[in-house]
Image (tube, rainbow, N blue to C red):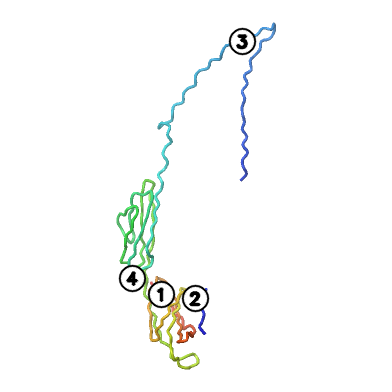
Amino acid sequence: MMKQRSLPSIPRVVLAVATVALLGACGGGGGSSSTSGPIVRDPPTPIPPPPGGGNPPPGPAPAPQVSLASQTTIVNQGGSTTLNWTSSNATGCSASGGWSGSRPAQGSATVGPISQQTTYTLNCSGTGGTAMAMLSVRVNGTITLSWQPPAARVDGTPIDELGGFRIYYGTRSRDYSEMVEVRNEEATQRSFQLPSGSYYFAMTAFDGDGLESGYSNEVIRRVN
């Protein structure tokens, strides 16, 4: 049989109204009364306008924003990629790291050849300050596996028809997230282009009817 793989409240506002009552004084005795003339008050003193003609001072300029993206973040050895960027509230940008020079506020550029992991930085400036964006592009390394095809089944009988091989690999031991099938019974090696890191490999063989063997011994390979 073929082996199967494992996966708050509303505030109450009280409005107080102040009422000013003007009381007139009444004279006493003899029924006589007195009257008063109109009250004369000085005119109010005018309040000078605030400096600047009454307009509020301008607020701070908005800070720049910038985004930087790559067509791909993993390339083969000596490969290239295209960087795309946009910015706002910026008048111009400058590149550093894996690239250099002045750049417009938005645009694209092809970078390469890339032979090792490289970081690209973009600084964009405007009246409100400076913003920075950066990204890294990794380079695949080559891993080559070699093997010896089996000549017999587990019970010792010869294999009449070998269908090929399946190569399982991943970044954790005995937990393989990837599989490559090699449909060539005479194949004895296979190369992989992989990002930097450690990888665990194991193989199986299958016959013409699709019957698959158990895993081979596990090997570990590292890409720097």
Seen as rendered, the residue at the extreme bottom is 157
Q: Residues within 10 Å of mark 2 (few under 14, many from 20)?
A: some
- Helix, strand or loop at label 4? It is loop
Picture quadrant of residue 58: top left
Q: Amino acid at mark 1?
A: Arg
Question: In this rendering, which labeled residue sits more in front, label 2 or label 1?
Answer: 2
* Residue 48 % position (x, y): 44, 26
Question: First in sequence: mark 3 or mark 4?
Answer: 3
Instruction: Determine the residue positioned at 32% across, 60% down.
Output: 109
Secondary structure at numbered mark 3? loop
N-term mark: 1 or 3: 3
The residue to which callout 1 is attached is: 222
Can you say whether 134 is above or below 212 in the image?
above
For the residues labelled 3 and 2, the Cα–Cα distance comes to 108 Å
Q: What is the count of numbered marks?
A: 4
Residue contact between numbered discs 1 and 4, judged by CB atoms under 8 Å? no
Amino acid at dot 2: Asp
Residue under label 3: 35
Report if the CB atoms under discs 2 and 4 are less than 8 Å apart.
no
The mark nearer the N terminus, 3 or 2, is: 3
Q: Residues within 10 Å of mark 4 (few under 14, many from 20)?
A: some
Counting residues from the start of the chain, the first of labels 2 and 1 encountered is 2
Disc nearer the start of the sequence (2/4): 4
When the figure is inspected, residue 164 is found, relative to residue 193, above or below; the finding is below
C-alpha separation, residue under disc 2 versus residue under disc 4: 27 Å
Residue 200: percent from left, percent from top = 45, 77
- The residue singled out by tag 2 in the image is 175
- Amino acid type at image mark 3: Thr
- Secondary structure found at label 1: strand
Task: Report the Cα–Cα distance between label 2 and label 1.
Answer: 16 Å
Which label is found at residue 77? 4
